[in-house]
Amino acid sequence: MSFFPPLPEPDPLPPRSYESGPGEAPPNWVPGAVPWSVLLARSADTAVALTHAVAYPRGVAFTVTTLLRPGSEGDREDAHWRPRTGSARGLRLGLEVADGRRAYGGGGLAPVPAPGPRAPDGFSLVSHEGGGGAVVYRHLCWMWPLPPAGPLTFWCEWQARGIPEMSVGVDATDAVEAARRAVELWPMPEPPEGRSGPGGMGSPDWYMAGGG
């Protein structure tokens, strides 16, 4: 006879949701690599770089890395750009695609209307949580939909670190071609009964901070 009383039967697990929204990379794809590795801006003690870009049929994920000269980081809140803690003097990031659509990090990330005719669908940019230390911090970013082929311009500004508004151009055709190399591994399950529509946007980190 056992010393311990019988354990109760565990409650059945609720249906698990695997859905993902447009504000994040799909979890059932292996993306294609995009050959972007560029220095977006720098000052005497600060640099901002774009690296590790990969493309999916519905968007592009990339890393924005901020690097500070050792000894210059101080203890200011804006020493690194982090989601939801940016200020008007924090790092700001934006982009403009070939057809004139724009998106920027700040506020609620509503796409910024471009002058003249504009496609009915917007263009969006989000930042998810990153990680790093005192002098290097990496931020995972996501742009969607997939940008059209042609020039793609990244803009950044970081007043607190002595970086005025600057822009760097890349070729979005690289991302379009990389997306064609992405591989879908398996279809995603249907969402549990009672839930409809994609998720992802409810996360507190679905937007990119940066002032505004």
Image (cartoon, rainbow, N blue to C red):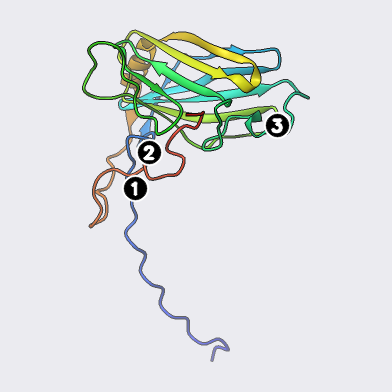
Which of the two labelled residues, at mark 3 and mark 2, occupies the earlier sequence position?
Answer: 2
How far apart are the alpha carbons under marks 3 and 2?
31 Å
- Residue type beneath disc 2: Pro
Which quadrant of the structure image shows residue 60? top left
**Few, some or many C-alpha atoms within 10 Å of disc 2 (few <14, some 14-19, many ≥20)?**
some
Q: Earlier in the sequence, mark 3 or mark 1?
A: 1
Closer to the camera, 175 or 31? Answer: 175
Residue identifier under label 1: 18
The residue to which callout 3 is attached is: 134
Above or below 30: residue 33: above
Identity of the residue drawn at 70% across and 12% down: 44
Residue 11 to residue 69: above or below: below
Relative to the observer, which residue lies in front, 10 or 105? 105
> What amino acid is labelled 3 in the image?
Ala
Q: Residue 96: horizontal and vertical position, in percent?
A: 38, 15
Label 2: state its secondary structure: loop
Is disc 3 surrounded by few (<14), some (14 to 19) or many (20+) residues within 10 Å? some
Q: Are marks 2 and 1 in contact (CB under 8 Å)?
A: yes
* Residue 159 relative to residue 14: left or right: right
Q: Earlier in the sequence, mark 2 or mark 1?
A: 1
Please tell me in which quadrant of the rendered image residue 90 appears: top right
Quadrant including the N terminus: bottom right
Label 3: state its secondary structure: loop
